[in-house]
Image (cartoon, helix red, strand yellow):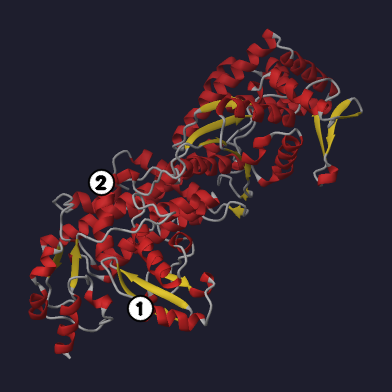
Amino acid sequence: MVGRLYGSLKKVASRFVYARDLLNLNTVNLTSSIISSLASKSIKERGYNYSVNANKPLLMSFNPVTPVPQVKGADLENNKLDSFRSFVASIVAEFSGISADNILAILEVPRNPEHGDIAIAVPRLRVQGNPAQIAQQWVEKFSPNEYITSCTATGHYLNFKINKLLLANILLDDIYKRKEKYGTNQSGAGKKALVEFSSPNIAKPFHAGHLRSTIIGNFVKNVHDANGWETIGLNYLGDWGKQYGLLAVGFEKYGSEEDLLNNPIKHLYDVYVKINEDADKNETINDQARAYFKKMEEGDEAALSLWKKFRNLSIEKYKDTYARLNINFDIYSGESQVSNESINRALEILKEKKMLQESDGALIIDLNQYKLDVAVVQKKDGTTLYITRDIGAAIERYEKYKFDAMYYLVASQQDLHLKQLFKILELMGIEWVGRCKHINFGMVSGMSTRKGTAVFLDDILEQTKESMHEVMKQNEKKYSQVENPDKVADIIGISAVMIQDMAAKRIRNYAFNWNRMFSFEGDTGPYLQYAHARLCSIERNCGFGINPNIDISLLSEKSALDLIDMVAQYPDFVKGALNTLEPCTIVTYAMKLSHTISVALETLWVVGQKEHKVAEARLLMYWASRITLGNALKLLGLKPLERM
């Protein structure tokens, strides 16, 4: 038996790099004497490096000499798994006569990891003959190389195994060089995306719907950044309309300059509630509000001066809240910023296209033939409406930014409004309307403090911080080691809110769960932060630094190779998230990565490992895992914690 193995190995030693996989000798350990015999001059001349462990199957890592095939669609620079996929695509292309470019796009990951790392369903190639028989014939033609170690058939599937140690070598080197850039790519280079998100109404509560728009919109912006796009984050404030006339009337009656400066959003909201109650009893107040807003639209300086004060103070307060959420906007705009010139130009086009109809003195667009109801674009008193300003804003934005994509992050309740907007732009002959996308999301219920109903986001965030502080204090030893526990509690609380919001597909409604949110176990924000902080702790306490030149063949355990596999998949998830714009794809990845890290940490210790080289190899692996997890958290908009 050993003689036959020796002969087979010697024949192919100059090419094979992971003997256990190549020969399917899953249960055979090659002794050091056989390995030593294989250490021939031909192997060394080809640039192979090998390590010997008499108690383990042969593991070799090396500097590959075979050039990676150039396959269209593969990103060899930014996604190291694509090197292996390119080889598989080229191998299957040689078998089938079909272009490797076309094959790359239909490669899969086997459902059963034991079958391999990369698979292809032969029927998808549309070759003549029995797919299962063809798969078996191709297996017999297969010759392994430095990247692809084996090929097997399972029914009509062709399964390939990759050289895991080569992947580890390439991957860990790449992460060491790129660090926070790992996972990003330049597929969108030269493209520009404008993302409108958050968009609260001044003098109204920053409620759960605005929170969802803020969190998801920030993710949409981040994921475009990560894929090489130039992005512009725009906060389109609800800062115009009759309600601001009502607010001005109310401020004259109930306003306080001191309260306005201390907490403008809350004070304006309180004023707005009181004047609305008055208006319900006295219709003349609404008449005063309409008259005041008409003066604003006509450019009356006195009317605009008070409105500007409300707006500017509110924006400054919003900025504090956004900073707490780790969010920045490039532009603070709003309905008020849409010029009268743009609105009038839009109305002129609508008239020229004969799209406008008069109804009780108002101007409307009948969209019933498109099952989109009727859109009112101008009231009978001549003032404009939200959709009119949206039309003008869209035209202004394209003229200024020439965007390749513009996203509106608005709740599904506004589906009709956005459909009307896009249809009107289309009927106006706007060629770029196809670049406008509505990214909608479902509603959240139960987001109120334990003390009662909370209408402001700051109330919710304070509640989460206080609750997380209580949880942290339960472990006195760890709590005493945390620097600035108040800030850490705030970050963990925000992580809890955000991950619960992004854990499922955005269109789904969900019920906010206070109790589950604070758990450090299960798929929660605190669990992700704990996984990251735990890896940071290992780096702090191990007593030595990162060695990028360590022998990677020391990472031979299954849990180590599984972790490297998971880390290697991150660029795929970043690219996939651009197509779906679903935060849950990255949340799911971060959870899987954290679980895989946890499994590895159960047996693969750094602190307490007697063999220093083994400890160094594991530290490099955990460091790369920490970088990857941190990058995923930042993509979601979270601040990764180093201590908690």
Residue 323: image quadrant is top left
Q: Residue at horizontal 42%, vertical 47%?
A: 468
Q: What's the mark number on residue 502?
A: none
* Residue 420 visible somewhere in the drawing: yes
Which residue corresponds to mark 1?
A: 141
Which residue corresponds to mark 2?
A: 177
Q: Total number of numbered labels?
A: 2
As drawn, is 269 to the left or to the right of 24? Answer: right
Q: Residue at horizontal 66%, vertical 22%?
A: 336
Q: In which quarter of the image is the N terminus?
A: bottom left
- Asked if the residue under mark 2 is in contact with the one under mark 1, i.e. CB atoms within 8 Å, the reply is no
* Residue 609 visible somewhere in the drawing: no
Label 1 sits on what residue type? Lys
Task: Find numbered disc 2 in the image and state the secondary structure of the residue it sits on.
Answer: helix
Relative to the observer, which residue lies in front, 145 or 497?
Answer: 145
Relative to the observer, which residue lies in front, 595 or 8?
Answer: 8
